[in-house]
Image (cartoon, helix red, strand yellow):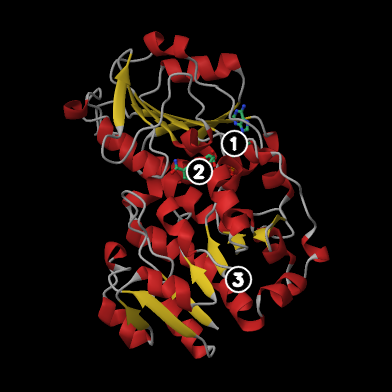
Amino acid sequence: MKIGCVKEIKNNEFRVGLTPDNVKAYVAAGHHVYMEKGAGVGSGFTDNEYIDAGASLIDNAADIWALVDMMVKVKEPLPEEYPLFREGLILYTYLHLAADKEQTDALLNGKVKAVAYETIQEKDGSLPCLAPMSQIAGRLSIQEGAKYLEKKFGGEGILLAGVPGTPKANVVILGGGTVGMNACKIAVGMGANVTILDVNLKRLEELDNRFGSHIQTLVSNDSNVERAVKDADLVIGSVLIPGGSTPKLFKRKYLPEMKSGAVFVDVAIDQGGCGESSRVTTHDDPIFVEDGVVHYCVGNMPGSVPRTSTIALTNATLRYGLQIAASGLEEAVKANNAIALGVNCYDGKIVNKNVAAALDYEYVDLNGLI
Ligand SMILES: NC(=O)c1ccc[n+]([C@@H]2O[C@H](COP(=O)([O-])OP(=O)(O)OC[C@H]3O[C@@H](n4cnc5c(N)ncnc54)[C@H](O)[C@@H]3O)[C@@H](O)[C@H]2O)c1
């Protein structure tokens, strides 16, 4: 199969769909890989590394779109890329179509076979191509929070670990899933006092078994959240209700009760956020202060560490990509239900139930089309 990978054109997006090691794996399996010149530079991979791995380098992204059987990307295509869609092209990338009617229409009109990383789902319910980004965002949330606690950013000027003779910072984590657990790991490692709240008692038990006396677990309800955030120096918002809107646990009325210069990192902002006072910010302008509390609400946190993010993402996406390339999408779908669940658009039809429901479009069973 001819595999293509172009440079991401979304603002501040430095990740790339294929690493040189991925190229080696595709080439070893008998495929040909076409990389756009400079596509990996933002993630620290040079053109020479791709050439050494066996890729052909091409100057112009449009030529790659026209040539390949499968395009491997990171982010959803932007409107300037829609005219490059064509019938039968396999597009393998994050798509997030439920909130993007314009892109969905373009994929349907172009009869693209669109496979979304975020809906590839294994039998145990896990989302293997989404989890690495939550791991990164969780770990990064403490790093960013620690930075914005510095006085020069409006923070209260407290060091997470303190030093002997001074108080440690109180870190409160709302939601103990993948993001919350990874935030917890770093906060504990940095020596902060950590409290983690979740509605899922089983999850709290797992966290308690894992971190023991290093953390305080609490069931998440209004009273516990209010008490915890009053004493917090750093609050992490990491709640998710799959398929539902994020509950606003972190209420605006808590802000005046909190320490001046406390920091709130709302990681869940990409799903609407769990703070009533949250609004989306960007890597260029990441924070704002409301009622003395510094808010950090960047929706694509992994983008600030593209080297780690690219490697982590492609560690997860490579094996499904290789399977699609080996047998073609149709056979891969029949052999692996995780890939079937990843297919969102096929032959001008929506074949993912949630996407169809969210956009109020007709859902068509993929099995009837292949
Ligand atoms: N900003 C970014 O760059 C970025 C990156 C990755 C993930 N995210 C977002 O982070 C959020 C968390 O993702 P995740 O992978 O950890 O999800 P997850 O499903 O692994 O964890 C969510 C947790 O929230 C808990 N929860 C649900 N309702 C709650 C409540 N009322 N109180 C407390 N806890 C509650 C769940 O029990 C679960 O343990 C999602 O919105 C995700 O989209 C953002």
Task: Say the numbered circle drawn on residue 240.
Answer: 1
Residue reaching furthest right? 368
- In which quarter of the view is residue 298 placed? top left
Q: Residue 62 at what x, y percent from top left? A: 39, 69
Callout 2 secondary element: helix
Q: State yes or no: discs 1 and 2 in contact (Cβ < 8 Å).
A: yes
Identity of the residue drawn at 63% across and 54% down? 119
Q: Residues within 10 Å of mark 2 (few under 14, many from 20)?
A: many
| Whole-number angstrom distance, CA of label 2 to CA of label 3 | 24 Å
Residue 331 is left or right of residue 252, and the answer is right
Callout 1 secondary element: loop
Q: Nearer the viewer, mark 3 or mark 1?
A: 3
Q: Nearer the viewer, mark 1 or mark 2?
A: 1
Q: Is mark 1 within 8 Å of ligand 1?
A: yes
Identity of the residue drawn at 56% across and 48% down? 96
What amino acid is labelled 1 in the image? Leu
Identity of the residue drawn at 46% across and 9% down? 253
Residue 361 is left or right of residue 133, and the answer is right
- In front of the other: 180 or 322: 322
**Residue that carries the numbered disc 2 in the rendered image:** 179
Q: Residue 353 at what x, y percent from top left? A: 74, 48
Task: Say the numbered circle drawn on residue 320.
Answer: 3
Q: Residues within 10 Å of mark 1 (few under 14, many from 20)?
A: many
Q: 8 above or below 206?
A: below
Q: Quadrant of the N terminus?
A: bottom right
